[in-house]
Structures are given as structure tokens and as C-alpha cells.
Amino acid sequence: MNQAVILAGGHGKRMKADIPKPMLEILDVPMLGWVIRACENAEISNLCVITGYKAEHIEHYLNGKYETALQSERLGTGHAVMQAEKFLSKDTEGNTLILCGDAPFMDAETISNALELHTAQNNSVTVITAELDNPYGYGRIIRSETDGIAEIVEEKDASSAQKRIKEVNSGAYWFRTADLIELLSKLTPQNAQGEYYLTDTISIALSEGKRAGVYLTDNQDVILGANTRKDLLMLRENARQKVLMKHMENGVDFVCTDGVIIGTDVEIEAATVIQPGTILKGRTKIGSHCKIGPNCLIDNTVIGQHCKLNSVQAYDSVIEDNVKIGPFVHIRPNSHIKSGVKIGDFVEVKNSVVGEQTSIAHLTYVGDSDVGKKVNFGCGTVTVNYDGISKERCVIGDSCFIGCNTNLIAPVTLGNGVYTAAGSTITKDVPDYALAVERGQLKVKEGYSLRKLKTKLFPEKDKDRNNK
């Protein structure tokens, strides 16, 4: 069986983060999540994640899906892999991939191709490498005469000639599992840092007559990692631009990409326009010929064709075709906005179904409701769904006209074609085609304000009365 060990125990002190460095996010996915996804896409599902600093964050993220091993002391990359000895010993017949949890751009194709070369050459270890125009800071790959690897020379130890080598170590390796276990047992901390270096396994393997190979990937980004917040920002921008380019190639139009952030799982059909300041997250799907933005936040929401959303936040909902929403609208989870609906400014919809061609123009709250088609909501309407203990639903039939400042006290049902008078508080069910008027009796007390405010309105008269 082929398996992987992911090194994710780093603190990243220069980040000044209070979580493990691999848990810092790129496009709303932890760097560790990117690495795990690459393994899964390469059909490697047997994983062990090495934890360290604040391991509980990674344990919570994995939620028991993959094994973990704790590196309580950070004594180098070789020491980190040693913590997976129990995991490795379960199956020593196959191969083991070693990856860095803070190098998010490793890809499935590189993993698979490197494994193919590793097995074809019968290598004990295969180093995944990349060529960089500016290799400064990376370990240089010294090739052997047989086109394998002779050694890895770190920047500080490289000669002038070696520094001109552009092929560098990515920090990712394929090992024959049985050989990895053996090589780890022979590592020693004989260096200035007193650490166990995984790179030393290569020289040990070569000294024992084992073959060490090299797989040069076309994806230069596999070597990218982050040690500072500046590095992390560069990774985020790298990922953002790649996603934007993918959508442009698929026919999505961007007026301007300022503030536009799109997650890796978002799907957008051709001829849709994305405006500045728009953030698309989760498994959002957007149909063709839509105009999204400016300043929208759409998360895990399905949007149909020919929709226009302006300054909208929508979460975990469905919006059908030909819907116009905004500005300043909040679509909360579990809402279903059906085709032809119009929702105007300062409206909130929560856990509700809104029927075809219904209009909710402005300043309205629709919560826990089932709304029919061709309903008109007047300004200031509220479905009063919570009594302080439990939440109830409102049902509104087709072609209803809800007058301004109507309160619908759930649970309540309006039949088809019902009208409510402005300012009514509806507490009982209303039958089809009725007019509901529920207001308190108007009482007029004439002269009330004159009596109340007479000292302010006529101070001279009050002063004269006191003088007498």
C-alpha cells in the first residue's frame, strides 16, 4: 500500500500566530487541507499527520479521518518522521510519501508521476525537485552520473558553482517504506542545530548501495511555503490569481479583480460577470449570464441563470433563475428564492421559501416562512417567528398583498389572495381573498399636547400667573 506522512507540527514563530502554521488559511482552506487534498486526488487515502504546536487544532480539523502522531519536541524533519514509526510499521511492503504541511501547492499529478518514476527505477528514495530562476535559499540538487541524486547541498554550504544550480529540493520525497524505517534508525543529530535531518537519509542510502532518484516537476509552486505573514500573503495572491485565470479561461468576465476572492470549489458558468469586492466561498455554483456584485459575499449557495445580485450576503441557500436581489440584502441559511423574485434594499430572508415572482421591496424580515408566488410585501413587514422560547412558521398563499408595517405573528396562515391593511398585527389565520385589519381602536384626546406643553409653549402667561 502507498501512504503519506505529512509534517504539520511547526509553530511558525515569525507568523506570530496562536495556531499551528499549517492551519493558516489560503482561500479559506488551511494549508494542511491543500496538502491533504493533493494526496486524496492522487488516490492516497492512508495518511498520518505529524502534529506538534497546539496539536488540538489539527486534531479538531481532521475530526478522526486520518491518523496523527505527536512530535512533542521539534528536533528536525527526520525526528518528525520518526514519530510515525508505528504508522509506517503497519505496512512495510509499499511506499511512503513525505510532504510538508505548510507547502500548499503540491499537486496530484506531481505526486503520481513521481511515484511512477520511483517504482520504475526501483529507488530507495526519490526526491521531488523543481527548477527556479532564482534558487536562493533552497537546497541545490547535485545529480549523479546515472542521473540520480548524489547529494543535496544547502545554500550556506554551497560553492559558487553549486549556487548556480537551479534545481532545488521541494522537501517532498517518496521512500520505499521498509527502507525509510531502516534509514530513520541510522540518523544522528551530528550538526550545529543538534537535529535529525531527513535529507541525511539520502547520503546514508547511497553509502549502502541503494539508489536515490530525482523527479523534476513542471510545477515550480510545489516548493513554495510561508515563514512570515508576507510569505503567506504571497501564497494567497498566487492562489487567488490562479483561480481567477481558470474562470476567465472558462468564459467568466471580470470588470476589475480588486477585492475579488473565489474559493477553489466554486463553479461559475460562462458569460457571468463578477464585479469588484465579491467573495465566493465553499461549494457555490453560479449559472450563466449573471451579474454578481459589487460587494457580494456568497457562501455555499446555488445561483441560477440571469440573476443580478448587488451587495448581497447569501449563505447555504438556493437562488433560482432571473432573480434580482439588493442592495444590502442578507439571505440566511436554508432559504430558497424561486425564479423571478425581486428583493430590494435592507431585506433579510432566513430559512424560508419565497415563491415565483414575489416582490419584497425593502425594509422587511421574512423568517421561517413559506411564501407563495406573486406576493407583494409592503415596506416594514415582519414575520414574527420567535416568542422567546420556540420558533414557528408563517404560511403566505399566492397573490397576497401585505400592507406596510404588517406584523405576522407565527404560527399564522394567510390564504390565497389575502390583503392585510397597513399597520396590522395579524394573530389569526386569514381565509382566501379576505382583507385582514387588526389594529387597536384609535382614541383621540383633544388638547392633550397643549395641556402637557403649555409651560413651554406659553412661558409668559405662566410667569404672569405666578407673579399674581
Image: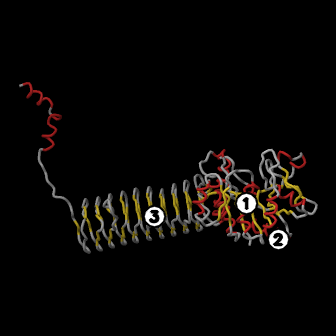
- In the rendered structure, the answer to whether residue 418 lies left or right of residue 75 reads left
Q: Is residue 332 left or right of residue 63?
A: left
Distance CA(mark 3)–CA(mark 1) = 37 Å
> Image point 24% across, 65% down: which residue?
427
Q: Which of pointers 3 and 1 indicates the residue nearer the eye?
A: 1
Q: Residues within 10 Å of mark 3 (few under 14, many from 20)?
A: some
Q: Residues within 10 Å of mark 2 (few under 14, many from 20)?
A: some
Q: Position of residue 196 (x, y in %)?
A: 78, 52
Q: Which residue is mark 2?
A: 119
Identity of the amino acid at label 3?
Pro
Using the image as rendered, state which of residue 28 and residue 441 is in the foreground.
Answer: 28
Disc 1 vs disc 2: Cβ atoms closer than 8 Å? no
Q: Which amino acid type is marked by label 1?
A: Leu
Residue type, label 2:
Thr
**What is the distance, in whole Å, between disc 1 and disc 2 at their CAs?**
18 Å
Marks 3 & 1, CB-CB < 8 Å contact: no
Label 1 sits on residue: 99
Which residue carries the number 3 mark? 333
> Which image quadrant is residue 413 in?
bottom left
